[in-house]
Image: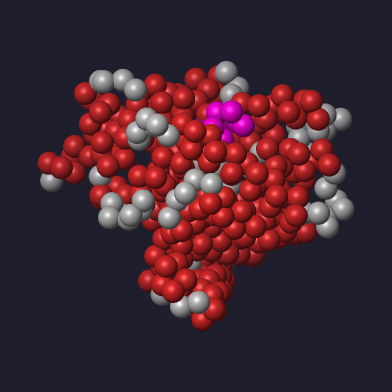
Amino acid sequence: MHEFHDAFIQILLLLAISVTVIGIAKLLKEPYSIALVIVGLILGLTELPIIEDAEFYITQSKVFQATVISLFLPILLGDATLKLPFHHLYEQKKPVLGLAFVGTFLSFLCIGGGAYYLLDLPLVVAFTFAALMSATDPISVLSIFKSLGVPEKLSTVMEGESLFNDGIAVVLFKISSIYLLTYIEMGWQGLGSGVLLFLKFAIGGALIGVILGFIFSQIIRIFDDYPLEIAFSALLFFGSYFIAEHFHTSGVIAVVVAGFMFGDYGAKIGMSKETRTNINTFWDVITLIANSLIFLMVGLEIRNISFAGSWGYIVLAIVIVLVGRTIALYVSTGWVKELTARERILLNWGGLRGSLSIALALSLPMEFDGREQVLLFTFSVVLFSLIVQGLTIKPLIQKLGIMKT
């Protein structure tokens, strides 16, 4: 009981810091995710005992690592599906499908191969890192797009890519970190087994999402009571995740599919305008809290990572990820005539890595051989991505002239 009380105090302290930073960032009209990372870095380099205790619980506690994925992912993904109208996504289906499916696999293969041959990482570690780097996080970029009036098309493409590639990246992460060596030893048979396992994860998760999304959409037809319908949405997001994971399929894909069905089909047949407004407001708050803790963790984790003698490898890892993203984007969207050359440049540089990569990296068990290497490169790339790419997106948009006239 005492341990739970201490843990609650630590989380409350970090939440207080996070909310303060977000408030200041919003007053300055800057992306709060970047501000949180910078503040986390500063706090991570200080020797304040109360910060050290909070940081230890957040980044080292096994309890936290066991729950970080199952708590944060359903929240972040469920909220995103509610906010992205399906008809907008359908209008941009070519670039979204190209990036999310072909692009994610190409990115995974390019980064994994580069990490194996150039960073000299063991095969499992290289492709675990590649899976983490195949997931994009558009939070910072989308807020900048909105403030500068970037056409909705690009926001939809970026958010749609992120939603679907998150699901694929998590499946690749599980296969790479748990099953990869076994399948390699099996040769061609192992390749077939890996493909079948991926399909089981993906299709199984999608089916569970469709079924639960449909059931909950029918349930909310009975009620016109927004507090109850908000509770149903939470039950749907967490329920679809845990049920899918129980049946050894993809919880992430289940949440995405269930969320889309609930937010589009369910909203049409069973949500009043008042419910829609309140449900979005509720998840705005919950997502803000989840993201604030995750981005602050990115900076705080700095004290647990030894950069000594690794700077050359870190720079190389960043280059590998950037090159992998570029190859994946241009190959996977080369056939899409709706995207201009300038829009491709912006989508390429805007493919930031963020909260999902961090959450997955922290979820690796302590006994995972190569965990420290994965954390070192993941945190380094995410820091570069959020700070360097995040802070240069605005001038890039202005330089390219991609704004509503």
* Position of the C terminus by quadrant: top right
Q: Name the side, left or right, on which 331 lies relative to 367.
A: right
Identity of the residue drawn at 25% across and 50% down: 63
- Overall secondary structure of the magenta section: helix
Identity of the residue drawn at 25% across and 28% down: 52
Identity of the residue drawn at 47% across and 71% down: 184
In the rendered image, the vertical position of residue 27 relative to residue 249, given as above or below: above
Which color scheme did the rendering employ for the protein? secondary structure
In this view, the residue in front, 253 or 271, is: 253
**Residue 322 on image: x %, y %:** 63, 41
Image: magenta residue range: 383-390
**Residue 321 highlighted magenta (yes or no):** no
In this view, the residue in front, 137 or 11, is: 137
Identity of the residue drawn at 61% across and 54% down: 110
**Residue 269 on image: x %, y %:** 64, 65
**Residue 301 on image: x %, y %:** 36, 35
**Picture quadrant where residue 266 is located:** bottom right
Residue located farthest toward the left when viewing the structure as drawn:
2
